[in-house]
Image (cartoon, rainbow, N blue to C red):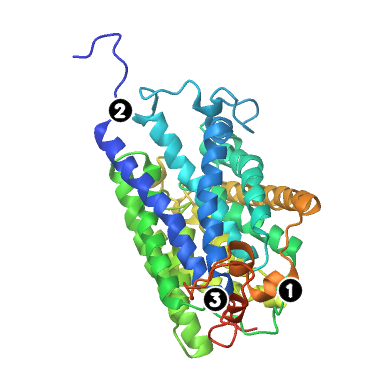
Amino acid sequence: MLLADSPPTPDSGDTAWLLACTALVLLMTPGLALFYGGMVRTKSVLNMIMMSFVSIAVVTVVWLLAGYSLAFGEDAGWGLIGSLDHLGMAGITPHSLTGDVPTLLFATFQLTFAIITAALISGAIADRAKFGSWVAFTAVWTLLVYVPVAHWVFAPDGWILKHLGALDFAGGTVVEVNCGASGLALALLLGPRLGFKKEAMRPHNLPLVLLGAGLLWFGWFGFNGGSAMGANGLAAAAVLNTQAAGCAGLLGWLVVEKKRDGHATTLGAASGAVAGLVAITPSCGSVDLLGALVIGLAAGVVCCYAVSWKFRLGYDDSLDVVGVHFVAGVLGTVLIGVFATAVMTGGPAGLLHGGGLGQLCKQLVAVLVVAGYAFGATYGIGRAIDRVMGFRAAPEHELTGLDLAVHAENAYDHGVLGHGSATAHASVHPHGAPASDRTRSA
């Protein structure tokens, strides 16, 4: 028996599960780096990968200094933001608990969500952003956009969770809608790439894309399963729903491609799987298996069409952050109001399970508010950075490639180093023609 003054002890099973899930979610960002890196042109692949890797470092520092406290500290009022009580993780010891797990572990798990959300935005501005400006943007955006939204949705006193009553199990609004709306804001601010809608811009390395997609899929089990905060039946249901939706999304995308274009592509398979995984993220803890299959299938089909919107509307979302993450995130969050079951949620139910329109309306409000805030705040941050230090890369750097111009490296000629060498510049296009990112033909 524990003595009365003994500190509370964490549940060893739940702690072990969350430790594993934290590692899985962190792996998603290097996976995203490969996923994105394979989609861009050979001349900017290292820059694309670096945008993800530097996000790991920048977001970690911001999160530990102030982000965690503002996101999960005691509410400062109206469910809008947390307190500053835990600046620099002050007051949190190895004995501090959040639920049945150490608070230090919970904070690290949530940190991995913040990292990948920031990194996801980079796909919308691939090939044309200054690296230093991206670093500055990541720090400011994490603090001013990600942190408040995380408090609204994930913190017990957050207004979307507590007062509105919208459901978001693992980050449909916090991660997917947030990064999609933010990516759109930056894409509009920076303008299209040179040659957009004139040059054929296709992935330069599809095996790299598929490797990245596989790592993302693997990590997603930690993303969704870990959000149950324990090694329990809810985690098992979330993992199963994640797998089902990812597969349904993949198949849905391929069916559309085959019918529309006559081919089922490897890029389509990777994109469809990601779309299904994105859509189930907010709903994996709220819907049954049938609901997960329908949501994943809907995401695969709708997102396959959505990625072409940029050609019609004229915005250059380089790697389809809007077409996949935003659209699938909206679908998955809103469809909770249709497919949620009381067995999974412990209370609220969706339209098809006797819950009426109430939950559906709550989900819509949450999506609209998060999307509007993320877009507006991101555009303002981007505009400020652009005025202070410039955000778009110089045209000559964009043409020759950001790898050489920014990093003095070339991904496919390891013997070439040095910014100014004639040999280095001659090898920028080793394959003769631009190979480009994931953009489909207009």
Residue type at mark 3: give it. Answer: Thr
Q: Counting residues from the N terminus, which is met first, the one under dot 1 or under dot 3?
A: 3
Per the rendering, the mark at residue 171 is none
Q: Counting residues from the N terminus, which is met first, the one under dot 2 or under dot 1?
A: 2
Quadrant of image for the N terminus? top left
Which corner quadrant of the image does residue 181 belong to?
bottom right
Which residue is identified by label 1? 314
Between marks 1 and 3 in the image, the one whose residue lies nearer the viewer: 3
Residue for point 29% across, 45% down: 233
Residue type at mark 1: give it. Answer: Gly
Between marks 2 and 3 in the image, the one whose residue lies nearer the viewer: 3
Does dot 1 land on a helix, a strand or a loop? loop
Residue for point 71% across, 58% down: 185
Residue type at mark 2: give it. Answer: Pro
Does dot 2 land on a helix, a strand or a loop? loop
Q: Is residue 53 left or right of residue 425?
A: left
Quadrant of image for the C terminus? bottom right
Coordinates of residue 293 in the picture (x, y in percent): 39, 64
Q: How far, Cα to Cα, is label 1 from label 3?
A: 24 Å
Q: How far, Cα to Cα, is label 2 from label 3?
A: 48 Å
Res 62 visible: yes
